[in-house]
Image (cartoon, helix red, strand yellow):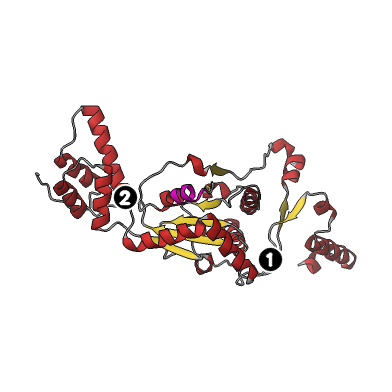
C-alpha cells in the first residue's frame, strides 16, 4: 500500500515512522498521545500480529478539548466481608460437596499453602472458578457467603462497565480492572475475591473475524483475549457466574480450575427451602409444594415475598390455595393440582 502512495524518498520516512510506532519510540508515544491498542503476543493463536494504535486519554483531553471528553474509570464495587449478612443456602448433594471443598480451599492457611506449593512447582497460582447453571439456583449468593465465611472482601465487576464507546477504551478498561484488583491484593491482609457476575457475554465463543468484520466484533474479541491472558496470569481468586455453558469458548473452559454446576434443587432440597422460608406451613403442605413445583430457590423466595406482601396488604395470612395460585403465576407453564389441606 505504501508503494502506491509514497515516492522513494518518503517511503524511507514512512518505514522509519512505522518502525518507531512498532517499537513505541515515536515522539507521539513518548508524549503519551498515542498508544498501542493491542500487544503482539500469541495466546492459543488468536491474537496474531495485528498492529493497531489509538489516542490516549491525555490526547483526548488536550487535543479534543471542545468535545469535553472525560476518560472513563473502571468501577468496581468493593464489598467488605464483614458487611455481608448470613443467609441459609441449600444445595443438592453433588454441588454441596463441591462448594464445601472449594470453601475449604479459600480458608486462610489452606489457600496460602496451596498457592505456595503451586508457585514452587512452577504452576499457575491463581484460583479461577466458574459457577454455572440455571437462573435462581444460588450462584451469586454462594459467592457472597464464601466471602463472608472466609473473611475475604469481594470486588464485584459490572460487565457493562467494561464496554467503552471509544475505539480502544474497552480494552483499557479491562486492563485497568485487573490493575485495580492487583492493587487490592497488595493492600489486603487476605486476598480478596474478584467476581464477574452474570459473565455470559464475555465468556461466549469468540467470533471468527474476516477482513470486513466490524470494529465492534474486533473489539469484543480483543477484550476476550485480554481476559484470557489475565486469567492465565492470575495471582488471586476469580469467580465467574453464568447461566450458560454450552456456548462458552473452549479457551475459557480450560482456564477455569474449578467448574461447579448449580442445578435446580431436587425434591428434598426444595422441601428444605420451603420449610426454611415458611416454617409455619404444615408438613403436608410443604411436601405438596415441593413435589408439585419444580422451582429454583429464587422462585421459592419470590413466592415467600408474595406471601408477605399479601399478608401486609390484606391483614390475613394467605391460605395454601393462595400459595398454589402464586406458584402457578410464578411459572405458568407448570401445571399444578389445586388442593385443599
Q: Which residue is drawn at 22% across and 42% down?
A: 326
Residue 304 drawn at (x, y percent):
27, 41
Name the residue that disc number 1 marks: 50
Secondary element at tag 2:
helix
Residue 307 drawn at (x, y percent):
24, 37
Name the image quarter holding the N terminus. Answer: bottom right
Q: What stretch is highlighted in magenta?
A: 144-151
Q: CA–CA distance between discs 1 and 2?
A: 47 Å
Q: In this view, does 94 lie to the left or right of 270?
A: right
Q: In this view, does 8 lie above or below 100?
A: below
Q: Is residue 81 above or below residue 102?
A: above
The residue lying toward the viewer, choosing from 89 and 155, is: 89
Q: Is the magenta stretch mostly helix, strand or loop?
A: helix
Q: Which of marks 1 and 2 is in front?
A: 2
The residue lying toward the viewer, choosing from 21 and 212, is: 21
Q: Is residue 202 left or right of residue 188?
A: left
Q: Can the viewer see residue 278 in this picture?
A: yes
Q: Can the viewer see residue 244 in this picture?
A: no
Q: Is residue 221 magenta?
A: no
Residue 9 drawn at (x, y percent):
90, 65
Q: Residue furthest right?
A: 9
Secondary element at tag 1:
loop
Q: Quadrant of residue 310?
A: top left
Q: Residue furthest front?
A: 109
Q: Is residue 154 above or below residue 117?
A: above
Q: How many marks?
A: 2
Q: Does the magenta stretch include residue 150?
A: yes
Q: In this view, does 166 lie to the left or right of 136?
A: right
Residue 324 drawn at (x, y percent):
18, 44
Name the residue that disc number 2 marks: 297
Dot placed on the residue nearer the N-terminal end, 1 or 2:
1
Q: In this view, does 225 lie above or below 149?
A: below
Amino acid at each position: 500500500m505504501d508503494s502506491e502512495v509514497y515516492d522513494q524518498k518518503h517511503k524511507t520516512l514512512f518505514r522509519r515512522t512505522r518502525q518507531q510506532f512498532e517499537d513505541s519510540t515515536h515522539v507521539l508515544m513518548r508524549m503519551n498521545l498515542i498508544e498501542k491498542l493491542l500487544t503482539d503476543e500469541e495466546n492459543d493463536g488468536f491474537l496474531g500480529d495485528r498492529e493497531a494504535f489509538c489516542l490516549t486519554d491525555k490526547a483526548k483531553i488536550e487535543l479534543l478539548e471542545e468535545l469535553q471528553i472525560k476518560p472513563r474509570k473502571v468501577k468496581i464495587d468493593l464489598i467488605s466481608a464483614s458487611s455481608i449478612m448470613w443467609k441459609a443456602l441449600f444445595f443438592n448433594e453433588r454441588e454441596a460437596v463441591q462448594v464445601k471443598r472449594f470453601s475449604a480451599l479459600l480458608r486462610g492457611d489452606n489457600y496460602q499453602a496451596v498457592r505456595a506449593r503451586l508457585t514452587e512447582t512452577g504452576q499457575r497460582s491463581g484460583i479461577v472458578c466458574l459457577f454455572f447453571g440455571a437462573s435462581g439456583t444460588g450462584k451469586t449468593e454462594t459467592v457472597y457467603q464464601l466471602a463472608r465465611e472466609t473473611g475475604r472482601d469481594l470486588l464485584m465487576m459490572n460487565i457493562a462497565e467494561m464496554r467503552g464507546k471509544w475505539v480502544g477504551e474497552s480494552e483499557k478498561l479491562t486492563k485497568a480492572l485487573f490493575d485495580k484488583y492487583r492493587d487490592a491484593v497488595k493492600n489486603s491482609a487476605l486476598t480478596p475475591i474478584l467476581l464477574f457476575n452474570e459473565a455470559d457475554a464475555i465468556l461466549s465463543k469468540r467470533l471468527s473475524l474476516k477482513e470486513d468484520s466490524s470494529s465492534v466484533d474486533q473489539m469484543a474479541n480483543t477484550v476476550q483475549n485480554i481476559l484470557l491472558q489475565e486469567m492465565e496470569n492470575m495471582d488471586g481468586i476469580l469467580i465467574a457466574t453464568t447461566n450458560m455453558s454450552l456456548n462458552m469458548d473452549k479457551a475459557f473452559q480450560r482456564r477455569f480450575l474449578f467448574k461447579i454446576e448449580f442445578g435446580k434443587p431436587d425434591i428434598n432440597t426444595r422441601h428444605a427451602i420451603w420449610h426454611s422460608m415458611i416454617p409455619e406451613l404444615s408438613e403436608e403442605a410443604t411436601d405438596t409444594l415441593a413435589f408439585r413445583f419444580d422451582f429454583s430457590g429464587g422462585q421459592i423466595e419470590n413466592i415467600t415475598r408474595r406471601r408477605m406482601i399479601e399478608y401486609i396488604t390484606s391483614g390475613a395470612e394467605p391460605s395454601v390455595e393462595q400459595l398454589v395460585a402464586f406458584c402457578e403465576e410464578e411459572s405458568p407453564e407448570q401445571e399444578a393440582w389445586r388442593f385443599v389441606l
